[in-house]
Amino acid sequence: MADILERIPNPFWRSTQAAVMGASATGILAAGLLGLAKIDDGLLHRLTLYGSLVGAGAGAVFGLVGVKPRLPETRVQPQASTTWQDWRNFVVERKVPESQEITSFYLKPLDGGALPGFVPGQFLTIRLPIPGQPRPVIRTYSLSDYADDPAHYRLSIKREGPPKDRDVPPGVASHFMHDQVQAGSIIEAKPPAGKFVLDVLSPRPAVLISNGVGITPMISMAKAVSQRNPARPLWFLHGARDGSYHAFRDEVGAIAAQTPSLKVHYCYSRPRPDDASHYHSTGYVDAELIQTLLPVAPADADYFLCGSPSFMDSLRSGLMALGVPPQQIRFESFAKAAPTAKAAVDPAAVNSAAVDPIGAAATAEVVFAKSGKTATWTPADGTLLEFAEDQGLEPDYSCRAGICLTCMCRLESGEVAYEEPPTGTPEPGSVLICVSKPQTAQVVLDL
Ligand SMILES: Cc1cc2nc3c(=O)[nH]c(=O)nc-3n(C[C@H](O)[C@H](O)[C@H](O)COP(=O)(O)OP(=O)(O)OC[C@H]3O[C@@H](n4cnc5c(N)ncnc54)[C@H](O)[C@@H]3O)c2cc1C
Ligand code: FES
């Protein structure tokens, strides 16, 4: 009885049901007992009626105060989370080939929660448990899609082969993503970050210039402008070897079809015969081409460059030669191993008292506080990350170029000098060891 009553949430209805049950039970009981006592029928009916009334009253009170209704059963809903701090699990929803080398991965949070929006141009840092690697591999990939309120994050990853003429293994993370990661795989990711971003609502003409896989942040930027500021003059210039290496052609075509202010130009360096209608010029995107395409003075536009280092170097100098102020030229390099001080150091200068051009010390004692190691650094040891690795430490890293903050480390004492101002801004009291060297005679790192 109690079990039935517990399922009735409305107290009035529960009390009524309990009264009916009480009346019936006491009525039947009283009739049975009094029947055995062989009293006359009139008295039997009256006593049975009184018994039922007492039972109904007791039942009503019991139903009202004596029964705790059970809470309705609820399905556990996934927590909606708008942001997260550290690593979060994502499930690969689908995998879509975009070109001969590039494949897109659509990611959704495994916890079913919400995804924070991001600024077009930002990236995601992911962590992959790759078999055979001594520890999880961390890499950084630009978000290649855009929505104000994203339903997924999309990464578009190029399969990174070994450099020409080098007998070295191919790219670890990109091969793992292409070959092992499938729909349903789980990947850890940090929240979107990065400063290579477009101010979407600015009215200034903007020129997005990329080659190869450098197209990924540009798609996000072009989509954001198309959705939120469609009147803004925008150029999308992209260089590819040929049509088979050209990713997102249809997607960019669809954006341009909805955005009359967006002008697209494709430049193929080695077009195939069947690429004929898919590109606008042959060769490479350079400052001269930009000047011919833009109806405004080059200095009146903002430029966003992403591609191979040589492509960006020549474009930056070409644009500056056209009078574009450097602060109007934003760029992001995907290449991990920018030449480091370790590679560039002049052996003759090692251990000499010569002043390092970036203000690094001639020699320094580096204390790795957590590991309990102390060692003497000289310019030949390169960055603090390289030095730490040479000492057998395994700090996390991804870009090794001062962009992603993966190598950020607390500086307990001393000072460091940066090879050049890093793109990423470390937290106060922390440094990016992938692009810094000791500046003081002693440096203590929380490593
Ligand atoms: C901000 C940012 C955004 C990025 N966005 C994208 C993106 O959208 N899409 C994308 O595809 N990439 C992007 N990248 C690049 C990406 O982070 C990885 O660097 C890239 O995928 C290569 O990683 P990997 O693990 O496959 O290669 P790695 O294993 O890191 O190897 C890199 C290269 O070094 C070669 N190599 C291996 N061993 C040696 C050796 N001993 N000596 C010399 N060379 C060697 C490999 O063959 C390979 O060519 C981005 C990078 C940054 C910093
Ligand atoms: S490894 Fe990316 S900032 Fe140092």
Image (cartoon, grey):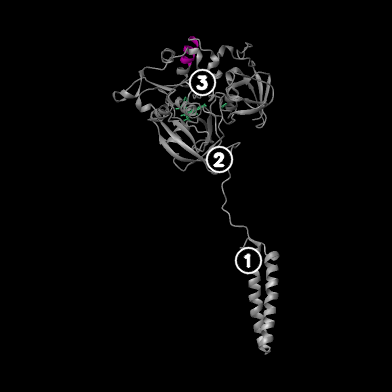
* Nearest the eye: 379 or 224: 224
**Mark 2 C-beta to ligand 1 under 8 Å:** no
Q: Earlier in the sequence, mark 2 or mark 3?
A: 2
Residue 366: x and y in percent read 66, 24
Q: Is residue 87 above or below residue 50?
A: above
Residue 179: x and y in percent read 42, 37
- The residues tagged by marks 2 and 3 sit, at their Cα atoms, a distance apart of 30 Å
Amino acid tagged 2:
Ala
Label 2's element? loop
Q: For the residues carrying marks 2 and 3, which lies nearer the camera in this image?
A: 2
Task: From the image, tell me which residue sits under label 2.
Answer: 114
Task: Give the overall secondary structure of the magenta segment.
Answer: helix
317 is within the stretch colored magenta: yes
- The residues tagged by marks 1 and 2 sit, at their Cα atoms, a distance apart of 39 Å
Circle 3 residues within 10 Å: few <14, some 14–19, many ≥20: many
Q: Are marks 1 and 2 in contact (CB under 8 Å)?
A: no
Residue 272: x and y in percent read 31, 23
* Quarter of the displayed picture in which ligand 2 can be seen: top right
Amino acid tagged 1:
Leu
Label 1's element? helix
- The residues tagged by marks 3 and 1 sit, at their Cα atoms, a distance apart of 69 Å
Seen in the image, is 379 located left or right of residue 272? right
Circle 2 residues within 10 Å: few <14, some 14–19, many ≥20: some
Numbered circle sitting on residue 5: 1
Quadrant of the image for the N terminus? bottom right
Span shown in magenta: 313-321
Task: From the image, tell me which residue sits under label 3.
Answer: 331
Quadrant of the image for the C terminus? top right
* Nearest the eye: 223 or 142: 223
Circle 1 residues within 10 Å: few <14, some 14–19, many ≥20: many
